[in-house]
Amino acid sequence: MGRSVTFLPVPLVRPQEPEPGPALVAPEPAPAAPRRTAGARPALVDGFGRVHRDLRISLTDRCSLRCLYCMPAEGVPWLPKDTLLTTPEMARIARAAVAAGVREIRLTGGEPLLRPDVVDVVAALAELRAPDDAPDAGTPVELSLTTNGLALPRVAQRLVDAGLARVNISIDTLDRERFATLTRRDRLDDVIAGIDAALAAGLAPVKLNAVAMRGVNDDEIVALTRFAVERGCEMRFIEQMPLDAGHVWDRVEMVDGQEILDVLAREFTLTPVGERGAAPAEKFLLDDGPATVGVIASVTAPFCGSCDRVRLTADGYLRSCLFAREETDLRSVVRSGADDDAIDAALRTCLAGKKAGHGIGEPGFEQPDRPMSAIGG
Ligand code: SAM
Ligand code: SF4
């Protein structure tokens, strides 16, 4: 029997003066100098001193599944096609973010692999490097993807060839009927084929995500973990968040991170792994490793104090938090022909409004209008 493990909530950082980022290169004294496009800019620091290094880009709001905690069965009002960012528009925003210190980009959705040009998106973003005048000049951006896995057998190798480094694949149950009920599609075998395709294509690590749900899959915590270990994948359990399209999330019903850990600790010895940093998952070695399991307790042990993420929706709105009620319209900025200074300014405007925490459970908390599938998880 393993020992019991408890979460330590990440403390909120106190407001402080934004730290200056890498210095701008002083332009040569030439009145008609071309506009700066690639120089390092100050770091993206919010009002609480949090430096933003991680950009999540939603490639589409559409999906091949209909998970109960994310999308309604039908009647989804899709984003109009002409509002979706094109690949060059997306790459331009990403380049501005990289100039300001972003070093990780995760592609998500909706189901990102439904985007017909997903390989081109990966290829365009994989070219991004830290600017020449940044302290880490030339460092490539770390590119990852979160997917339901269905299209991986078709596209995994091309994604790797285009520059994708890592993948997270969602799998909430190993039971075919449950899977069909939970996702409203009978596709469990295809997800498993997707996991195998990701491994065969050399994506590493392959992380498996499961949202823990009472009476749905809370009896599969150990089985899912063993399934991941057998394949050499890392299992991640996620607390369900109030981001469902139906707005029926109930805190009382939620399987919390502590409960997940208690179940795991009855089966495995759990040893906390290193510093969590800005990572959402609290990681543990299973039976002294090398396999690990992670628990993302976004609701009961929020990691807002060390959050370094900012999100771009498929239609070009920037969100400082999954739960933000305000968005910054970057699509209009990009389509107006504005220069990189304007994109940089819009990034900073968005982060200036970032709240200290997500506020779930606090009086006045309101679920965002966009469901998870339209924000980008
Ligand atoms: N379609 C892809 C997938 O399912 O992996 C990417 C998008 S999905 C929104 C990203 C992640 O968010 C998935 O791991 C999914 O399980 C998780 N997710 C969706 N709705 C959630 C909710 N209400 N609470 C917690 N996690 C959620
Ligand atoms: Fe689709 Fe992912 Fe949402 Fe499931 S969690 S409905 S796979 S976007």
Image (spheres, rainbow, N blue to C red):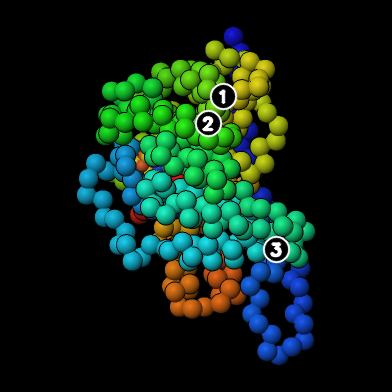
Element type where label 2 sits in the image: helix
Q: Quadrant of residue 136?
A: bottom right
Rendered position, 266 above or below 159: above
Could you tell which of marks 1 and 2 lies nearer the N-terminus?
2
Residue 148: image location, x then y, percent: 40, 38
Residue 347 at x, y percent in the picture:
56, 65
User: Spatial distance from mark 3 to mark 1, Cα to Cα?
Assistant: 35 Å
Residue most toward the left? 75
Residue 292 visible to the viewer: yes
User: CB of residue at label 3: within 8 Å of ligand 1?
Assistant: no
- Report if the CB atoms under discs 1 and 2 are less than 8 Å apart: yes
Name the residue that disc number 1 marks.
Answer: 232
SS under mark 3: loop
Identify the mark at residue 199; answer none if there is no mark: 2
Q: Position of residue 183 (x, y in %)?
A: 31, 34
Residue 326: image quadrant is bottom left
Query: Which residue has dot 3 on it?
Result: 131
Image-based side of 258 in relation to 75, left or right: right
* In the rendered image, the vertical position of residue 122 relative to residue 193, given as above or below: below
Residue at horizontal 48%, vertical 72%?
334
- Look at the image and tell me in which quarter the N terminus lies: top right
- Amino acid found under the numbered disc labelled 1: Gly
